[in-house]
Image: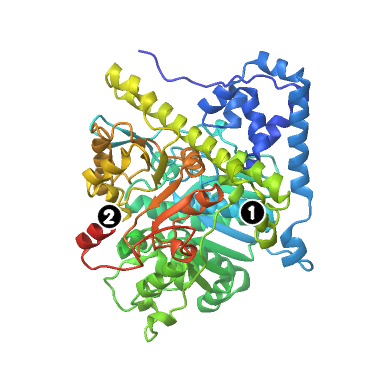
Amino acid sequence: MPGRPLRTFTILPHIPEKLAHLRDLAYNLWWSWNPDAIALFRRIDTELYESVENSPIRLLASIPQSRFDELAQDDGFLVHLDRVWRKLNEYLTRPTWFKEKAMPTGEMPLFAYFSMEFGLHESLPVYSGGLGVLAGDHLKSASDMGVPMVGMTLLYRQGYFRQYLNPEGWQQERYPDHDTFHLPLISEQTAEGEPLLVSVPFPGRDVWVRVWRVQVGRVPLYLLDANLARNSIEDRGITAQLYGGDQDMRIRQEMLLGIGGIRALSALGHRPTVCHMNEGHSAFCSLERIRVMIEEHHLDFATAFEAVKAGTCFTTHTPVPAGNDAFPPAVVEHYLGNYLHSLGIDRHTFLALGRQDPRDESEPFGMTVLALRASNTSNGVSKLHGQVSRRMWHRIWPGFHASEVPIGSITNGVHVPSWLAPEMSHLFDRYLGLKWQEWPTNAEIWKRVERIPDEELWRTHERRRESLVALARRRLYVQLQRRRASPNEIAQSYEVLDPEALTIGFARRFATYKRGTLIFHDPDRLAHILNDKDRPVQLVFAGKAHPKDAGGKDLIAQIQKLSRRPEFRRKIVFIEDYDMNIARTLVQGVDVWLNNPRRPMEASGTSGMKVCGNGGLNFSVLDGWWVEGYNGDNGFAIGAGEEYEDTETQDLIESR
């Protein structure tokens, strides 16, 4: 029986000197929102680029030497490479908004953005959904504006799960390992040239993490990796899966992110002026900053707490109490009991920081509560979500009316270049000029949209719809082959959807409150609408349910079952394994984006914003950002902002 290999070698082709900048470009994710850079990598080998999940790193590792030799002699390719390389360098060196407008003089601050996940590109699978994609868009926007920011997260070797459906339509999960060699990771080093390691105190031991960096334009994102030989097998698994495991695993991950994140920044020579906690997962970073303040300045806990609080802000995303991490007191004491000694406080004082009612000894320790208490400013992610958050957490401020609770709102946005179709971007360049990306809030520039001929705008949109239909057919073909469907069913996969039919998209996390099957409430009426000879309509679905969410999985199974009915067979497609690549194709290609959460449980819902820039329309419940975005003639509203106690009545009314 063969044993395990003693050592694994990776053989790479030699990249000729003329093409050396290809590797430099691949290691800065600026390429991911620059259409010309993406076109450069696709030009090397389009089919291979798509097969390696649009990853330049994997592409360069997979290209045969003969192809590199050809490219080194291709004058057209070399000119293209030089143009993209110059664009990157111009981007990195030009004056920025932050330096010119926000901080023209004085010492530059540093903002540290902590998040459990970052969605930057599908080739870096350390994200699950909207929270991570928002965080990724923040880093990209900060880079464009020149905001001095660093990101901090964990490096998940298996990332979030990969989804596939069994023949009954029930979601299955798999967790492939991601080789760090094939990710755009740069190893941070010590002065001696060794990998940079930091430790985090755990019960009876230290857990060590290695610090990696991903360059996002001007902004570095640091990732902590516990998969080290010096850690136990159990501790190496802390950074294996995003949102995997039980409560013990979750608190371990949050200790690494918060405490380890601050220690990693210190080891890198970064002393953040402000720490931004994106959701409560990273709230322990405030504890570590307090500990450092006590140690360096010999302060008592209360004074250090107020000093750290002044430089901390917090964004809450979850309008559902169950979605906010809370740990039994015994679990918190087990993992942080010894750490409390360095803070100079007793268990009661510490546990009170994570309780809405500090006197309630039975109340769990809430990470969102800790984040709210330790922040100078806190916000929801839309005006309505701000109201919901104030009601949810008003007990933290006894004596305050809910309207007076100090939780504001900053409505989420999107990084437009990341989600805009290249064809639409070129259209804007022609008719708006080249300043629309640098000054996206300049209303005078956007008035020029009226100059775009309707026919040209529509042709551009139709090409994107055709691309969406082509993707859906390819993915359905692969899905059916994997499920070992009949040859006839597989053959029909290339006949689903109509490139000219009105296409409605629904793609998001499949939680029950998002009501993914609401449109099927009256299947006969829906069949009549979809099969109208003069005005045909079709539906494209995508999304993942949390592995432990049986209700969400059931919604997916229902859609799969319905899509097989004869009247729906070519009109409805569910695309498996939703990721950022599928998301881009959907928001760029649909005519209408459907969103029907149970109000007021949608915190923001930024996917609909991405559709707008691509010429699509929103059809949504007045929840999240759409309450503010809808003006009566820029899309469609479901209901008028009502909230119901009887959910069955709500579903019946809103499904109509």
Residue in the image at 29% along x and 32% along y:
569
**Residue 595 image point, x, y percent:** 38, 53
Considering depth in this image, is 210 or 416 the residue closer to the camera? 416
Considering depth in this image, is 642 or 581 the residue closer to the camera? 642
Quarter of the image with the C terminus is bottom left
Give the amino acid at mark 1.
Answer: Glu
Quarter of the image with the N terminus is top left
Q: Is residue 432 above or below residue 377?
A: above
**Residue 93 image point, x, y percent:** 78, 49
Considering depth in this image, is 310 or 229 the residue closer to the camera? 310
Question: Left of 69 or right of it: where is 183?
Answer: left
Q: Which residue is mark 1?
A: 450
Give the amino acid at mark 2.
Answer: Ser
Residue in the image at 41% along x and 28% along y:
473
Residue in the image at 55% along x and 74% along y:
304
Question: Left of 378 or right of it: where is 190?
Answer: right
Question: Left of 465 or right of it: where is 189?
Answer: right
Question: Left of 34 or right of it: where is 568?
Answer: left
**Residue 495 image point, x, y percent:** 37, 25
- Tag 2 secondary structure: helix
Residue 240 occupies quadrant: top left
